[in-house]
Amino acid sequence: MKLVGFIGWSDSGKTTVIEGLVKELRGRGYRVAVLKHCPNGFDWDKKGTDSARIWAAGAQGVALVGPDQVAFLERVAEVNLKQIAELYFPDYDFVLIEGGKEAVGFKKIMVTKEELPQDLPVSSGELLAVVSDDPPNIDKPVFGFDQLAELADFLCQREDLERPAVILSIDDRPLPLKPFVQEILAGAVWGIVKKLKKLPERPRRLRLFLKGDREGKS
């Protein structure tokens, strides 16, 4: 999974860039997910619907399941965009985050226009590139709004965007694993699973859920 954020002031064109990039990457056969940061909250469902009533009643999680789509809402103690991406979209090729200027832990692309301020709070170490209609004087790759194919090429080539291939989450908190630990876990689990019947011929991903009791016993 490659994780990258898109930051910019309101009306900078973040959604336009992400929309075009999703189409470009999907056209190349990649699985793409998008996280949209909504610091002021959002409307989950229309007032008065069954799901809205259930959510208002205090349900910790609610899912809407249609013929070809699923929407899921869950209450969390704190919001960490990187952890949410790793927890819910670990098997996607790309996860694009819209917003989250103050979030840390992943590379970001600044989307801006000539008439907007250029002083977004992002460190040079996290800034990956810039999308702008007026190329700024900056030591980073710059793309125009009409160069989304080139931006897709750029992201596909960046190996440093890759997240761990094996993700271990405890109480919805992904834990960092060193490469050799990932290899040990993957080898052990796949070694057991491959002995099971009715296994797909070429499985690409595996999810394992373990629930311990309240005393910490597994």
Image (cartoon, rainbow, N blue to C red):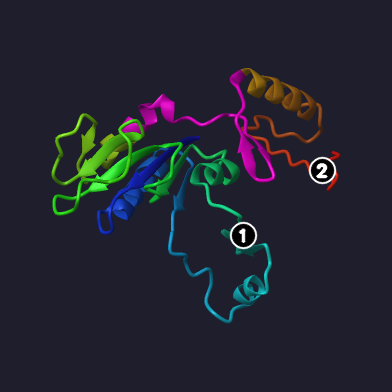
Which of the two residues, 80 or 3, is positioned nearer the viewer here? 80
**Dot 1 crowding, Cα within 10 Å, few <14, some 14–19, many 20+:** few
- Quick check: is 154 in the magenta stretch? yes
At x 16%, y 46%, the residue is 133
Q: Secondary structure at mark 2?
A: loop
Residue 59 place in picture, x, y as percent: 68, 67
* Pointer 2 residue: 212
In the image, is residue 196 above or below residue 62?
A: above
In the image, is residue 49 above or below residue 186?
A: below
Marks 1,2: beta carbons within 8 A: no
In the image, which residues are magenta?
153-179
Q: Earlier in the sequence, mark 1 or mark 2?
A: 1
At x 21%, y 29%, the residue is 139
The three-letter code of the residue at mark 2 reads Gly
**Dot 2 crowding, Cα within 10 Å, few <14, some 14–19, many 20+:** few
Which of the two residues, 23 or 42, is positioned nearer the viewer here? 42
Per the rendering, the mark at residue 75 is 1
The three-letter code of the residue at mark 1 reads Arg
Residue 140 place in picture, x, y as percent: 24, 31
